[in-house]
């Protein structure tokens, strides 16, 4: 789960990490008032749940009321990678001498948190990782030790020589790790952390992502969730035991299992088609799940054909076939479907589907080819 | 021979009185797995499918001499269940539970290492050595005894693969579902090494997924250490960045973890990568000169 910059900085501030003075605004008028309160120069920053705001023109430094007005008018309502900007953060302009990158995330290989710092802050860290990987210093955090004072000091000395900065950084790094652990974050990032003109550390930006698996024990974090329209559909699906992600293609997919669902999408693309969604219906022959899944797929108006790919494991193919028939009898579908059923008792399952006059194929490649052909026929 | 589980496996089921635990205990017994006991706090003294239930893993190990445990408890309690098994001296723990918080896995990992406990999962379908033991929620009927070692991050995609292997006359030594979470127990490198050392395994199938760089690391390991032929398939070639494809670990973040990078890494390590699951049996037959 992702949250906005202003929310991340509110959390950081709660842990006494110094952040810029700032005010959240929804309208141009509010921006004017906020800028007046904070004083010029200040920065108007789009609050959207995606990266690359700066490049998209969603962050503007303003020096007077007129500029604040122009920036606010431009940014509020603008589209950044499919996200509409509904709110902006007006932050006090800060004079600084240096920009640092600080981040904590999980390293799958060492099975521990990793603390990353770089003197090349301010730019996208992925870019630094690409062009100058040695500029990023990584510290693996032993879960038993955490960021003990000496660990924080070690990281601080890797960045600074000045005693005052080392002392401030040591304190900040301990707090940052505490935030990471206590909120079940998957990423905490301050980029840039600046050294101000008067020699203090200050977080100009903040980013936090959280582990979806841990949200059950983080009610305060969960309350910050602002799902997009697509994500609302995904959440609705999840409540019905379906894992759904909308894509841009025209071939709807219904598959049991995440890996097989991905492989099915790949297969469609391999044969020149475009999948309309990722959809994992899990392992059961419950007709209701198929009905829910089918309704979800056809709610996407781009879908021209539905491809059903089920592997019968513990749930045998004959049971799956009966479930499919029961479901398809209950909903009216006007678009063509292709069914591919394989696995335990597949012969019996296919026989049942054949008797019900449902379009069956034997292999995944046949299914993909047939779905694409049907799709092309419709478009002609 | 096989790896990790076999005829000598003496299995405990943690969460045996739950719906899933009970259901799969029956399936495992039917397959021929030696299930020696179950754990459910407060229900010690009862029995499930003829298997004695204990209050604690320590009691169960004492009472049965178990060496392996499978975990079906809810995600919030899974990490504690793994630690309990490890502390009681169980050598191999398989965590089926789905949705375990990542930091829980991070927290337990040093203790497991200290105790020398092997963990598979969480969020995995388990493992099987055909005709010897099935420890998991796998559809036992599709597996056939043979010489192919298989490891995978996915469930049904594995079954799809195994079904095609079995129907093409390619049996398996052991098939391991390592799970789809970002931080998990045994991974490609450890399993590659075990298959390399297993005299019965002649070739290895590695089924990967988008997200992380475990496949790239596995490719390096194969180049340096593995002499047996390895073939692979990577799911998620068409997945968009930033979207979690069912598994928590299957997410492409900021341009890394893509299928293209993984395929390239494998191919440059001499691992043949199938473009679709159906190609795997053909690739294996060519390599093994069947």
Image (cartoon, rainbow, N blue to C red):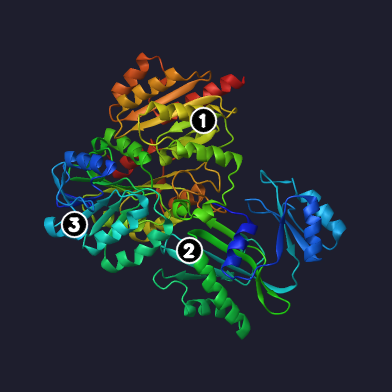
The answer to whether residue B289 of the structure is visible from this angle is no
Q: Are marks 3 and 1 on the same chain?
A: no
Residue found at the far front of this picture: B42
Mark nearer the viewer, 1 or 2: 2
Describe the element under mark 2 as helix, strand or loop: helix
Q: x and y percent of residue A288 in the render?
A: 41, 27
The residue positioned 45% from the left and 70% from the top of the image is A141
Mark nearer the viewer, 3 or 2: 2
Relative to A348, is A368 on the left or the right?
right
Chain ID at mark 3: B
Q: Crowding at label 3, few (<14), some or many (≥20) Cα neighbours within 10 Å?
A: many
Tally of numbered tags:
3
Q: x and y percent of residue A306 in the render?
A: 49, 26
As measured in the structure, the alpha-carbon distance from the residue carrying label 1 to the one carrying label 2 is 36 Å
Q: x and y percent of residue B57 in the render?
A: 21, 57
Q: Residue A111: give its label.
A: none
Residue at numbered disc 2: A182
The residue positioned 52% from the left and 26% from the top of the image is A372
Relative to A324, is B167 on the left or the right?
left
Residue at numbered disc 3: B67
Q: Crowding at label 2, few (<14), some or many (≥20) Cα neighbours within 10 Å?
A: few
Q: Crowding at label 1, few (<14), some or many (≥20) Cα neighbours within 10 Å?
A: many
Q: x and y percent of residue B11 in the render?
A: 19, 51
């Amino acid at each position: 789960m992702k949250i906005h910059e202003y929310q991340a900085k509110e959390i950081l501030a709660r842990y006494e990490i110094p952040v810029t003075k700032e005010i959240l605004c929804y309208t141009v008028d509010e921006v004017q008032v906020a800028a007046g309160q904070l004083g010029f120069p200040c920065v108007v920053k789009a609050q959207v749940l995606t990266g690359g705001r700066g490049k998209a023109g969603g962050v503007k430094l303003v020096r007077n009321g007129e500029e604040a007005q122009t920036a606010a008018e431009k940014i509020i309502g603008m589209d950044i990678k499919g996200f509409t900007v509904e709110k902006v953060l007006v932050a006090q302009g800060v004079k600084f001498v240096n920009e640092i990158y600080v981040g904590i995330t999980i390293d799958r290989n060492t099975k521990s948190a990793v603390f990353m710092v770089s003197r090349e802050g301010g730019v996208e860290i992925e870019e630094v990782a690409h062009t100058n990987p040695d500029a990023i210093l990584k510290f693996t955090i032993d879960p038993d030790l955490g960021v003990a004072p000496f660990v924080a000091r070690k990281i601080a000395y890797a960045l600074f020589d000045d005693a005052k900065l080392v002392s401030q950084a040591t304190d900040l790094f301990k707090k940052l790790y505490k935030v990471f652990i206590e909120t079940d974050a998957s990423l905490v990032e301050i980029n840039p952390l600046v050294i101000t003109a008067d020699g203090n550390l200050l977080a100009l930006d903040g980013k936090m992502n959280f582990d979806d698996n841990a949200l059950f024990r983080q009610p305060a974090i969960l309350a910050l969730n602002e799902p997009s329209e697509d994500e609302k559909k995904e959440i609705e699906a999840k409540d019905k035991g379906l894992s759904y992600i909308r894509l841009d293609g025209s071939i709807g997919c219904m598959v049991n299992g995440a890996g097989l669902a991905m492989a099915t999408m790949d297969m469609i693309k391999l044969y020149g088609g475009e999948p309309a969604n990722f959809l994992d219906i899990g392992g059961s022959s419950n007709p209701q799940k198929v009905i829910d899944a089918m309704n979800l797929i056809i709610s996407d108006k781009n879908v021209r054909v539905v491809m059903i790919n089920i592997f019968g494991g513990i749930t045998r193919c004959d049971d799956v076939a009966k479930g499919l028939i029961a479901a398809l009898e209950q909903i009216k579908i006007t678009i063509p479907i292709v069914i591919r059923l394989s696995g335990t008792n597949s012969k019996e399952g296919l026989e049942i589907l054949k008797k019900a006059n449902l379009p069956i194929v034997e292999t995944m490649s046949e299914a993909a080819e047939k779905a694409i052909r049907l799709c092309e026929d419709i478009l002609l | 021979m096989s790896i990790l589980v076999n005829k000598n496996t003496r299995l405990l089921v943690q969460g045996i009185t739950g719906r899933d635990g009970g259901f799969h205990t029956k399936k495992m017994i039917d397959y021929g797995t030696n299930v020696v006991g179950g754990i459910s706090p407060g229900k010690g003294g009862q029995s499930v499918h003829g298997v004695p239930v204990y209050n604690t893993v320590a009691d169960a190990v004492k009472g049965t001499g178990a060496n392996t445990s499978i975990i079906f408890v809810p995600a919030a309690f899974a990490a504690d269940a793994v630690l309990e098994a490890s502390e009681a001296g169980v050598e191999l723990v398989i965590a089926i539970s789905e949705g375990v918080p990542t930091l829980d896995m991070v927290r337990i990992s040093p203790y497991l290492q200290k105790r020398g406990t092997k963990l598979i999962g969480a969020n995995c379908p388990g493992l099987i050595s055909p005709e010897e033991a099935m420890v998991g929620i796998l559809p036992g009927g599709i597996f056939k005894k043979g010489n192919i070692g298989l490891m995978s991050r996915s469930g049904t995609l594995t079954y799809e693969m195994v079904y095609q292997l079995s129907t093409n006359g390619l049996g398996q030594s052991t098939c391991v579902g390592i799970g789809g979470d970002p931080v998990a127990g045994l991974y490609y490198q450890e399993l590659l090494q075990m298959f390399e050392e297993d005299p019965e395994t002649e070739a290895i199938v590695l089924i990967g997924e988008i997200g992380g760089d475990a496949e790239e690391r596995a490719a390096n390991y194969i180049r340096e250490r593995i002499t047996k032929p390895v073939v692979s398939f990577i799911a998620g070639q068409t997945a968009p960045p930033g979207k979690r494809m069912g598994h928590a670990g299957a997410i492409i973040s900021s341009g890394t973890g893509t299928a293209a990078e993984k395929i390239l890494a494998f191919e440059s390590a001499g691992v043949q990568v199938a473009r679709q699951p159906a190609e795997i049996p053909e690739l294996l037959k060519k390599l093994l000169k069947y």
